Amino acid sequence: MDGFECAGHPGEDDVGNYVLLAKAAKKLTIPFVASGGVGTGSQLAAALALGAEGVNCGTRFMATTEAPIHDGIKRALVKGDERSTTLVMQSVGNTERVFKNRVTTEVREIEKRNPGKIEAIRHLVSGENYRKSFQESGDPDSSVWSAGIVMGLIDDVPSCDALVKRMVAEAEEIITGRLAGLVRGRSRL
């Protein structure tokens, strides 16, 4: 289940994970994974509490040592905050959450003048452009590239192993510590 907080294409309904996951748990008969705005152990615990079997942390894993992207992009993820993204391509019905930079500002301005015309922005939103940023230049301002609002919670570039262990330990501490203290024995009323 991909909440509106996610990087990339959140859909056109603007539904965040608190509502989306709770509704999925109520309606689905199959296991599901929470995606969008997840990058910490507390969020893992919350997703599990809302019915998810696990989480997908795309933006968070971009800022790991193993991620095959330029260190300049990883630094931008660490430096950014939860307000460092914007939405583009809404006018063409293909909304994408991306890192806010000079190119995305230009895309949004062109979209305002030419709503619904992909031809007007195609040269700026091309995948070839972001490939160059990710693999060659590392310049976070040179292209349109997906990033989620979880950027506000990224403050380091650990290994994948260290990140997973940290998230699991944090989730376990919350579930067995603070939350366990909220649960009392069954009432005999």
Image (spheres, helix red, strand yellow):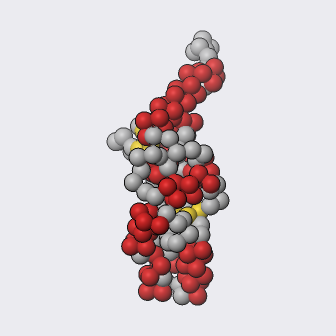
Which residue lies at the image location 47% right of the left edge and 35% below the top edge? 162
Q: Which quadrant of the structure image shows residue 156?
A: top right
| Residue in front for this viewpoint, 117 or 137 | 137
Q: Is residue 106 above or below residue 163?
A: below
Q: Is residue 55 above or below residue 100?
A: above
Q: Is residue 117 visible?
A: no
| Residue in front for this viewpoint, 102 or 119 | 102
Q: Residue furthest top?
A: 188
Which residue lies at the image location 40% right of the left edge and 67% below the top edge? 131
Residue 137's x, y, as percent?
47, 67
Residue 44's x, y, as percent?
51, 38
Q: Which quadrant of the structure image shows residue 181?
A: top right
Q: Is residue 119 visible?
A: yes
Q: Is residue 137 above or below residue 79?
A: below
Residue 52's x, y, as percent?
44, 40
Image quarter where the C terminus lies is top right
Which residue lies at the image location 55% right of the left edge and 82% below the top edge? 111
| Residue in front for this viewpoint, 33 or 15 | 33
Q: Is residue 23 left or right of residue 84?
A: left
Number of numbered callouts drawn: 0
Q: Is residue 181 left or right of residue 40?
A: right
Which residue lies at the image location 49% right of the left edge and 63% below the top edge? 138
Residue 101's x, y, as percent?
59, 69
Q: Is residue 161 above or below residue 28?
A: above
